[in-house]
Image (cartoon, rainbow, N blue to C red):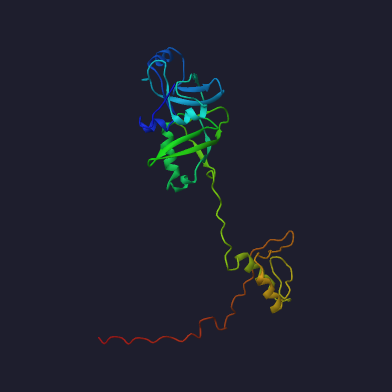
Amino acid sequence: MIMLRKGDRPELNHGGKIIMPPSALERLAGLNIAYPMLFQLRNEETRKVTHAGVLEFIAEEGRVYIPQWMMETLFLQEGQLISLENVTLPLGKFIKIQPQSIDFLDIHDPKAVLENSLRNFAALTQGDIISILYNQTVYELLLLEVQPSGSGICIHETDLEVDFAAPLGYVEPDYQKPRGKSIVRLMSITMKFKRKKETDDASGVNTPNLTDEEIRDLLKGDEPLALTIPNNKLFFGFPVTPFAKGKDLPGDNVPEGRVLKKRPE
């Protein structure tokens, strides 16, 4: 087993396909196997397992070239023996990934980047930390979940739904509370400003009249007041009193502007 060098076709080192010797192709051609060819890679010492596709059969006899991230996943050293077994995996439907750095948030369109990068993969294994290359920067992604659940999935010619978890080390920003009163608070206070004789048509509850001092106490708090509604009652908004016909409407007494004289014909 040989690790792919960083300068040798970078797209291979940041994908999920391996390079095998021609003798492997001759052996597989005589077997009844499914395509695409998928393999289970196992480190017999640590019992670690992952899955990969095959890209080419051009390696030297007795050697297999695999990406660096795959070696780290299997805890392998260059020249160490590895076990390969041809397997059939179900078509993947869903994956959930977690970027291992907050630098991943700098990518403008992560969906397009991930879609393009996954073309270099044929199979994914839950728990693996894969690597992708974008704009000369390497990003590591932890596969938190794959569906159908099991040892691995095939992502060749399938519709795959992707969900992103918060990147490792990401801290939610501590937004400061706004200075103004919230809409919920203003709505609650408006209900309490009604007179004793007025009744909310929606709730059927009389609302008390508050003094100026009580109103100032309400406005001092930071939390919005609760919009209390009795059980089995629906709230459809506050009542609106339309203007009566014959009465002055707002804007009726606004002085008119000057009228420009017509240009003589």
Asked if one can make out residue 193 in the rendered structure from this viewpoint, the answer is: no
Residue situated in front as seen by the camera: 174 or 53: 174
* Residue at point 45%, 43% (across, down): 111
Residue lying at the far left of the rendered structure: 265
Q: Position of residue 38 (x, y in %)?
A: 47, 23
Q: Quadrant of the C terminus?
A: bottom left
User: Residue 187: where, in percent of width, then height?
Assistant: 63, 68
Q: Residue 138 at x, y = what percent?
A: 43, 39
Question: Where is residue 94 drawn, in percent x and y?
Answer: 53, 36
- The quadrant in which the N terminus is found is top left
Q: Is residue 203 visible?
A: yes
Up-down relation of residue 125 to residue 206 (above or below): above
Residue at the location (71% across, 65% down)? Answer: 203
At a point 69% along the width and 73% down the height, the residue shown is 217
| Relative to 160, residue 45 above or below | above
How many discs appear? 0
Quarter of the image for residue 176 reads: bottom right
Q: Residue at x 45, y 13 (%)?
A: 31
Quarter of the image where one finds residue 229: bottom right
Q: Nearer the viewer, residue 42 or 211?
A: 42
Horizontal side of residue 55 vs 232, given as left or right: left
Q: Is residue 139 left or right of residue 47?
A: left
Instruction: Say above or below: 12 vs 60.
Output: below
